[in-house]
Image (cartoon, rainbow, N blue to C red):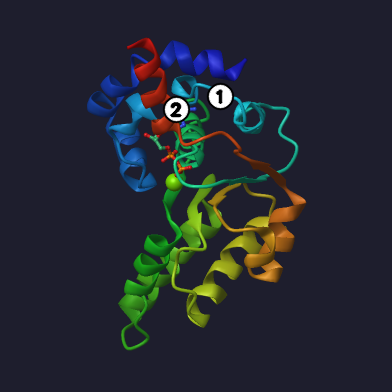
Amino acid sequence: MEVEKEIAEKKTIGDKMETDSKFAGMVKFSGIPPRTHMTKRLFTFLPMKGSEKAYAAALKFVSDKREHPFFTLVGDTGRGKTHLAIGIGWHYLEVKNRLVKYGQVANLLDDLRSGYNIDSAEDAHNFDTKLNQLKKCGLLILDDLGTEQGTPWAREKLDEVVDYRYINELPLVVTSNLKPAEIAPRLARRLSEGVRVALKCGDYSCIIADRRKEKG
Ligand SMILES: Nc1ncnc2c1ncn2[C@@H]1O[C@H](COP(=O)(O)OP(=O)(O)O)[C@@H](O)[C@H]1O
Ligand SMILES: [Mg+2]
């Protein structure tokens, strides 16, 4: 099982970032906060009542039994959506050795927009490069879909990226606390073809605090 391989490698990833400049470059490119290699991993996720299904689906997504390249995690804040999404990201980086792009949707779109200036050929090139990275990287993780300012420009670019990945069957992980009806129809249709799991557990920090109290 690939996750066992990940556990075996858990002690080495910090070293790898320091000694393997190519790997360090891939981590930097990914936008995944480096220190989360200790915290937001698949093997550090404790499945709770209401999150076992999402956990099992995340493990399946990184295995060779993956059902569909699109994977959506939904649920309220504090349920572990970002944890699982970043955990999948680390797995793609260290076990699959693939280029990953992670970000809050709003930030990814802001960054894309900052490279957009039709006045200069250089900026146009910069913009194309950034857009192509989102379209073509080994795994794209769109965290917190729906919190971005839905300008027509942002919606159009998001649509273009997701459409490209859909047509080319490239892996996409999305987290959101929106209901399907609240997501733009075309995007919602694309996502609904993939695997969608809801985290119905309580807020993780509250569960942990309650357990501590019980232990006294
Ligand atoms: N089942 C879990 N096991 C371990 N840590 C968890 C779990 N669920 C959430 N956490 C931790 O709780 C915090 C909030 O989780 P997060 O993934 O940010 O939630 P969400 O993205 O759903 O708002 C993070 O520090 C995360 O690592
Ligand atoms: Mg989150």
Q: Position of residue 64 (x, y in %)?
A: 69, 27
Residue type at tag 2: Ile
Residue type at tag 1: Met
Residue at 34% across, 22% down: 13
Q: Is mark 1 within 8 Å of ligand 1?
A: yes
Q: Can you tell which quarter of the image residue 113 is in? A: bottom left
Mark 2 Cα-neighbour bin, 10 Å: few <14, some 14–19, many ≥20: few
Is 133 placed left or right of 49 in the picture? left
- Quadrant for the C terminus, please: top left
Q: Give the foreground label among 1 and 2.
A: 2
Q: Are marks 1 and 2 in contact (CB under 8 Å)?
A: yes
As drawn, the label of residue 48 is 1
Most foreground residue, 95 or 148: 148
Is 66 placed left or right of 144 in the picture? right
Task: Name the residue tied to disc 2.
Answer: 207
Is residue 24 depicted above or below 1 in this figure?
Answer: below
The CA span between labels 1 and 2 is 9 Å
Most foreground residue, 11 or 181: 181
Residue at 36% across, 26% down: 209
Q: Position of residue 177 (x, y in %)?
A: 55, 53
Residue at 48% across, 24% down: 45
Q: Position of residue 12 (x, y in %)?
A: 33, 16
Mark 2 or mark 1, which is nearer the start of the sequence? 1
Q: How many circles with numbers are drawn on the protein? A: 2
